Amino acid sequence: MPFSSLSPTRYPVRRLVGSSPDWQEAVCLRDFTFPWENTLAPQTEFRALWDDEKLYFRFDCVDEDLVLGSGKTLKARVLGSDRVELFFAPDLDLTPYYAFEMSPRAEALVYAGQFYRQFEWDWTCPELTLEAEINGSSYHVQGSLPLATLRRLGILKPDSMAFHVGVYRAEFSHQADGSIHSGWMPWVNPQTERPDFHVPASFGVFELV
């Protein structure tokens, strides 16, 4: 599917100047909403930069009520936590796509998927680097992926400077009855009736500029 038809929302990824990311040089993306709830979304900022070797990314999230999963497995801990997410796809058929769900404890659940919601939990991406920090009522998560990995997976096509990405935040909160409320914040509102990131309409386009 072409970039222009189903992915009109674009984010310019500026080229890194120097040997390490200066996040002030990146375009700050703040367009995260609660499309399935009538409530104000907490502040979320996303930034990305690139050089000849890697795509660098960073999330900064205000969170007054941090939820951290306590499961015995990494999957349970990440899925039970507040977290940020990046999905990458070679095209909008989503066959396949690749998901990176990353918690404030720098734990990452990575998996491959096929539309619709057919998950390959054994898929791994050891090339991902990740670090995170919790600081009072906020947390940040940052990391990098080699451009060579994006090319190998067919995400970044030869002679192309654009690719399909979904950017999301899972915002959980404690309820008075002891339960956890799950809130879902996409960059691109997919206009689905129920919360769903795993659809083509939730993806935008990153352009390396």
Image (tube, rainbow, N blue to C red):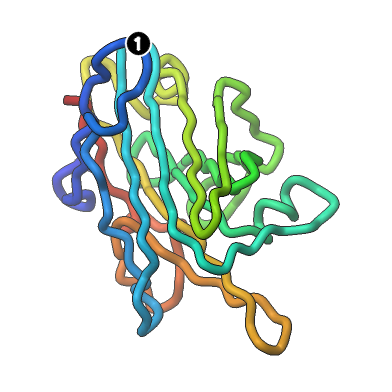
Of all residues, the one furthest to the bottom in this rendering is 177
User: Residue 108 in the image: x percent, y percent?
Assistant: 62, 40
Please report the residue visible at 38 percent of the width from the left and 49 percent of the height from the top: 167
User: Residue 15 in the image: x percent, y percent?
Assistant: 23, 21
Please report the residue visible at 21 percent of the width from the left and 27 percent of the height from the top: 14
Of all residues, the one furthest to the front in this rendering is 136
Q: In which quarter of the image is the N terminus?
A: top left
46 to 197, vertically: above or below: above
Give the tally of numbered discs.
Answer: 1
User: Amino acid under label 1?
Assistant: Ser
Q: Quadrant of the C terminus?
A: top left
Please report the residue visible at 85 percent of the width from the left and 52 percent of the height from the top: 72
Please report the residue visible at 63 percent of the width from the left and 83 percent of the height from the top: 175
Pointer 1: residues within 10 angstroms few (<14), some, or many (20+)? few
Identify which residue, 89 or 59, lies in the foreground.
59
Q: Name the residue under label 1.
A: 19
Identify which residue, 157 or 67, lies in the foreground.
67
Occupied quadrant, residue 81: bottom right
Occupied quadrant, residue 67: bottom right
User: Is 161 on the left or on the right of 80, as rendered?
Assistant: left
Identify which residue, 123 or 16, lies in the foreground.
16
